[in-house]
Structures are given as structure tokens and as C-alpha cells.
Amino acid sequence: MSRNQDLAGLFNRAADVMALLEENSFRVLGTRKVARIIEDLPEDVKLLDAQGRLEHISGIGKSTVEKIHEFLRTGHISEFEELTGRVPAGVLEMLAISTVGVKTAHQLWKEAGITTVADLKKHLVEGTMPKMKGFGEKKQLKIRQNMEFMEEAGKRIGIGWALPLAESYCGTLAKVTGVSQVQYCGSLRRGKESVGDIDILVCAESSTAPAITQAVLAHEQTQQTLGAGDTKISIRTKAGLQIDFRIVAQQHWGAALQYFTGSKEHNVRLRELAVKRGLKLNEWGLFKGEESVAGENEQGIYAALELAWLPPEMREDRGEIELAQLMYKRSRGEHIEVKDQRLEYLGQKIPAVWPVLEIADIRGDMHSHTTASDGHCSIDDMIAEAKRRGYEYFAITDHSKSQVQANGLRVDRLVEHCKAIRAAAAKVKGMTVLAGSEVDILADGSLDYPDEVLQKLDWVVASPHAALSQESDAATARLVRAAANPLVDVIGHPTGRLVGGRRGLEPDMKAVVMAAARSGVALEINSHDLRLDLRDIHARLAVEMGVPLCINTDAHQREDMDKIIYGILTARRAWATAENVINTWSWEKIRQRRESRRNGSFEG
Ligand code: DGT
Ligand code: CA
Ligand code: CA
Ligand code: ZN
């Protein structure tokens, strides 16, 4: 929800300003924490406020509520503006350069008198930087390189780019003699929709470093080395992405894996748990004094902290630590009581081992296109591909008539198309082929085909494509209305957002999820790496409220079906297990639910 993001941005920015002004560090931390809480809210702050629920959110105190009120009234927070006025705008801009943290910016400002990014660049290029402690040639070069990179690339890289690239480097390194394991970490391993850089861990003795360096440099995507030592190699790829490789010995592998996977917030919590037990946790291991307690594998570290191991996608400090504590207890046969509100919905279902959702759990793709609308492959080709993947069912859902630019089908063409799909289906053994539609949800929430037409289809995905910048209230009403139609099986890419591109609809997602819960419609996680819609926090809301998800690829050609992995990663970030995803069920189970919704006997 972008209003929440804008508000969180103000708190984050204020925390930066406070740090630059050397305010009390508790105040800085507290402000950052509030920013994170707001960022993670699955509902619009305006709505929460209107319903008087703002003050009940843990971590949001009275003074924060007052600030939020001011923001909702005026769009700004005067206390923060007053603070920001005390720092030159250019100094704040510098913080966007990676490797320029608050400390460095403060130093540049106070010691060198540099107050603009342009001025900073000039000093770096001309070598006129005043001498300062901890500000040697190396650091200067790094800042300069990062500035140049920012000018080139500007923003974060989508997971659809980063994951194949990381896998390619990992594949290359796995073949190097002396390398026993390779794993990408960081935000990529956590399955985030976009990443700042790629972090790769290589398990080997440091004597292998030269061979590893050689292999990295020989990779066809490597453009430039930023640094190469015995334990760390940094490069820039041709696409402008930075990759950091770290070489780690076997006995530190698990600790390094855990540390570099993050998130930083998750790690901070783990370190606190370690400290409480008189232990020290870092990227080398978990230590009691000098003695190593754990470090060779991740499980050992979690277990020593009395936590169950959790999938990387859940490590965002969004309640997973509390869950891991309960899972650990349960695995040891202890009675558990759930007090944490966020965990309540899991209730007595808290497992001893988290049942990680896998690609193999997916039994069918329920949203795809053919040349009948804007796809690139025939009905037969798409069916063959689904069959090749071992799917038990497969839905062909071309666009409806309003999608003129996508060659959407008028009713007469839809009838013909369904005939063709069913004829093709009759030739397929062992896979149920569904003749469906991706029907447009029009701006007012009505559908692009009348009910009589939808009634005849085997599968109905309803998605918004146009009017994606409408007001939030209108977007809510639109999606709620579409969700209420029992002829709709799935709401496809519910917001229409594009990662790093279009904001899409910004409905009151809780209202949409509640409408889905009432009607029994599933909500899609569209797996296309540029969509990932529902996004993680919204899908989490669906899971918490018992609304099933449907993970589809929206394939427009055979190879698009590979993109299912991105949907799976997003679903894991939403704490979904196979149970929460309808297309891990048998077709018979889906069909029965569909029947009951269509004949009015469905009961939540
Ligand atoms: P990104 O690259 O912006 O998408 O996000 P990450 O999470 O990959 O962050 P990155 O690349 O800066 O660092 C990789 C991991 O290293 C991060 O997930 C956790 C760990 N890490 C980095 N900085 C810190 C820190 O200051 N404290 C702790 N505890 N861990 C850190
Ligand atoms: Ca990273
Ligand atoms: Ca990194
Ligand atoms: Zn669509």
C-alpha cells in the first residue's frame, strides 16, 4: 500500500536525519522501528485510523499516532520537516549511494564541508578529498564506483533477472576443484521480488581462492573486478549488477549462510537471543567465550538458540522467530500456548517442522494464453508443455472482449475457442484440460462477459487490466464486487501492479480478502517476475484469513511456465504451505468447491 510506504519513508528519512544530527541513538532506532511496522502493515493506515485501530498496533505509541494524524491531514509531519531543515539536502542525497552510510555522510559534511553530491563527485574525480580518518584511497574508489553505478543502473534488479544470473555463477563455481558447496544468499535467497545485489557464498579453503577468482573472472557475464582477495571477490556484471563472493571454510559454513542470508532485522533478533544465553553470534559461528557452539550448519545455530529452522523466505522479523520458538518446543513434545496475535491463526496447527511449499507441490497451472488472444503458442503446444511438466490439470484462459489490444475474444470467438480446446483436450490422456477465460474486471467491478457465458466455462480467472490508477475506494469496490461473483474461480493479478514500474490498484486489501473469504474465490499469486501480484504481505493476509491462493504463471508461451518458481517464493514469503494453495489440491477437490460455489451450497 503506497500510502503506508510514503509514510514509512518519512519515518526512515527522519531516522537518517536524527542520526546525522547525532541525536540519541534510542530515538533513531525507535523511529526506524516505527517505519518498519508501518511498512509491514497489510492495511492502509488511513483505514486503520478511521476504524480507531491505529493505537492498538503494538509499537505505535501516542506520539506516533499524532504524527500519523498530521500526515493523513496534511501529507507531511512538521516535527520531521523541522529536523530535516537542519541538514543540507545534498547530505541526505548522499545516503542513497551504497557504502555511504550515516557515519560517512556526517564526516563528509562536518569534517570536509561537502554538502552536495556534485561536490562529492568533483573531489573524488579530481583527487582533492581532504585527509580524514578512515577515508583512504580504497574507500574513495569504492564510493566513486558506486556513484557511477547508481548513475547507470539507478535501481534494484528484479528477481527474474537476478536468480538465473546467480544460478549461473553458482553452477560455474560448483565445478571448481576444492569447492564443496555454493549458495546465493541475501535478499535473493529470501526470494524478494527485487534485490540490491547478489551475495554468493563458496565453501572452500582459502587456498582455493585463486582458482575461484579465475572462474569468476572467466564467466561470460563478468565485466569488471571491484576487488579480489583470499576471502572475498567483488565484481560488476555486464548488466551492471554487483556480485559479492565470499569464501568460507566448512566449519563456518552454516554461520556464514545464516548471517549473509539475513534479513538484517532477523539477524538482529537472533543475536539478541544469543546474548540472552550468554553466547555470541556472528558470521563465523555461535560462541560461548572462545568455544564454538555451532556454525557448521544453519540448523545447528537455530537449534542452539532453541529455534526451529525456518525457510529463508520467512526471515524478515515478521513473527517467524516467535513461530520458530513454538515449533522448537513442539518438536520436543512440550505443550505450547499461542499468545502472539500474529500467530493465532496458525493456532494448534503449528507444526514441528515447517512444511515448505515446493514447485513439485503444484499440480496444475490455472492461467495461460494461446494465439487465440495474445499468446505465442497454439492450444496443442501449451497443452503439450503442461503435460511435459507432469501437471494433472491445466487451464487455458485467453483474454475477454474488452482487451482489444490483446486480441480479446468476443463471445462468438470464445465459443469457437472453447470447442477447439475441448477437441484438443479429448486427445490428451492423464491431464484435465480446462476451457476457461481470463475475463476482464471492468472499472466498476462488473465482468466483461455476462453470467450466461461464464456459466459454460470450465474455469474463470477474473482480472483487472484497465483503469489501474483509480482511487483506492473505487478499487476496493471493484475487486469486492468481482470477488462476490460465484462464477469467478480466481481473481487474477488482483492489483495489476508491475514490480519497480506501475503501482497498480491500491484497494483496502483486507476488505478484498474478506470478500474472498465469504465467496470462496481464490486469489492469484501471478508468478510472472514483473507482476508478483498478490505481493508477499498481501498474500500473507489471505493465508491468515484462510483464503486460498492460486499460483499461476499467466504463460503466454511454453517457457513462461518456468516462472512458477517466483510465485512459489512469494508464497513462502507469505507463510503459505501447500494446503493454502488450491492448485496443489486434486482437481476433484477443486471441482467440488467450484460446484458448491456455483450451486449456492458453499460454506466458508
Ligand atoms: P539487498 O541486497 O538490498 O536486496 O538486501 P540484502 O538483505 O541482500 O542485504 P545486503 O546485501 O546488504 O547484505 C546481505 C546480508 O548480510 C543481509 O541480508 C544480512 C547481512 N547483513 C548485512 N549487513 C548487516 C548488518 O549490519 N547486521 C547484520 N546483523 N547483518 C547484516
Ligand atoms: Ca544482497
Ligand atoms: Ca551484498
Ligand atoms: Zn492478465
Image (tube, rainbow, N blue to C red):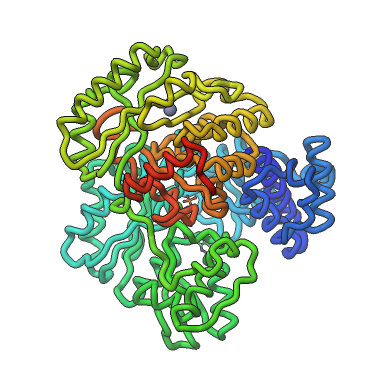
Which of the 4 image quadrants contains residue 10? top right
Question: Is residue 150 visible from the viewing direction of this image?
Answer: no
Which of the 4 image quadrants contains residue 244? bottom left
**Residue visible at 69% across and 30% down in the picture:** 473
Ligand 4's image quarter is: top left
| x and y, in percent, of residue 407 in the image | 37, 14
On screen, residue 114 above or below 437: below
Which of the 4 image quadrants contains residue 446? top right
Between 563 and 189, which is closer to the camera in this rendering? 563
| x and y, in percent, of residue 526 in the image | 42, 38
On screen, residue 309 above or below 470: below
* 488 lies left or right of 119: left
**Residue visible at 30% across and 23% down in the picture:** 375
Between 422 and 407, which is closer to the camera in this rendering? 422
Quadrant containing the N terminus is top right
| x and y, in percent, of residue 201 in the image | 34, 61
* 365 lies left or right of 524: left
* 582 lies left or right of 485: left
Between 545 and 518, which is closer to the camera in this rendering? 518
Between 270 and 583, which is closer to the camera in this rendering? 583
**Residue visible at 65% across and 39% down in the picture:** 508
* 534 lies left or right of 47: left
Question: Is residue 375 visible from the viewing direction of this image?
Answer: yes
